[in-house]
Structures are given as C-alpha cells and as structure tokens.
Amino acid sequence: MTAEPLAGVIWDLDGTLADTEQAHFRSWQLFCRQFGHELTWDEFKPTFGLSNHDVLRGLILPDLSDAEAETLSQQKEALFRQSSAGLIE
C-alpha cells in the first residue's frame, strides 16, 4: 500500500503561536477612539478573526471604499504592532 504524497498544509497562525487577541483588542480600542467610539469587549469579540476591512465597515463606517478601508487598515495595523511589541517580534 502506497500513500499519496502530501499536496499542502493549511495552518492558521493567528493565535496558534502567540495569543494576539488582547493586542488586537487594544489596537482596535485605540483606533476606534479616533472616531469617538469606545469599543467594548462585547463589540470586539464577534469581530476577532475577521478582515480589517470587514471590521472597519461593521464598527466605524459601513460605506467605506476599498481604498479608504485599506488606508484605515494600515493605520490600525500600525497600532497593533505597537500594542504587540515584544509579543510577535
């Protein structure tokens, strides 16, 4: 009996190697404050794992263009890198 060769592997690294949930929450809180919104844990929790574009449209501005969402996403990711300093270096 011969085994078929392995064709590929799917691996979700977010949360597997480092628990980044709190760092994402902190960065989203800081980001939302810029828009006058105090993000709660209950609001954040269902968004964890969604793309930044989906979270932005759900929490901040539903009518964002793709270009606007990308610009804001980059700003949020900069806050995430600051929030997670030392965690994911």
Image (cartoon, rainbow, N blue to C red):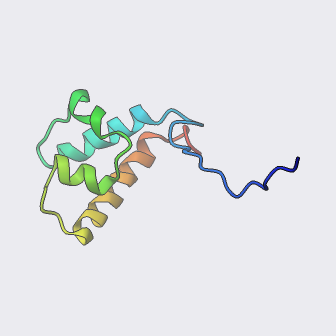
Apparent side of residue 50 relative to residue 40 in the rendered image (left or right): right
Number of marks in picture: 0
Residue 33: where, in percent of width, then height?
Answer: 18, 43
Residue 8: where, in percent of width, then height?
Answer: 67, 56
Which residue appears at 22% of the width and 28% of the height? 42
Residue 53 against residue 36 in the figure, above or below: below
| The C terminus lies in quadrant | top right
Which residue appears at 56% of the width and 44% of the height? 13
Apparent side of residue 44 relative to residue 10 in the rendered image (left or right): left
Say which of 34 and 71 sits in front: 71
Say which of 9 and 70 sits in front: 9
Q: Quadrant of residue 62?
A: bottom left
View extreme (right): residue: 1
Residue 19 against residue 82 in the figure, above or below: above
Say which of 49 and 34 sits in front: 49
Say which of 49 and 56 sits in front: 49
View extreme (top): residue: 42
Apparent side of residue 72 relative to residue 80 in the rendered image (left or right): left
Residue 82: where, in percent of width, then height?
Answer: 43, 45
Residue 20: where, in percent of width, then height?
Answer: 46, 36
Residue 63 against residue 76 in the figure, above or below: below
Q: Quadrant of residue 24?
A: top left
View extreme (front): residue: 1
Which residue appears at 33% of the width and 36% of the height? 26
Apparent side of residue 89 relative to residue 29 in the rendered image (left or right): right
Q: Quadrant of residue 32?
A: top left
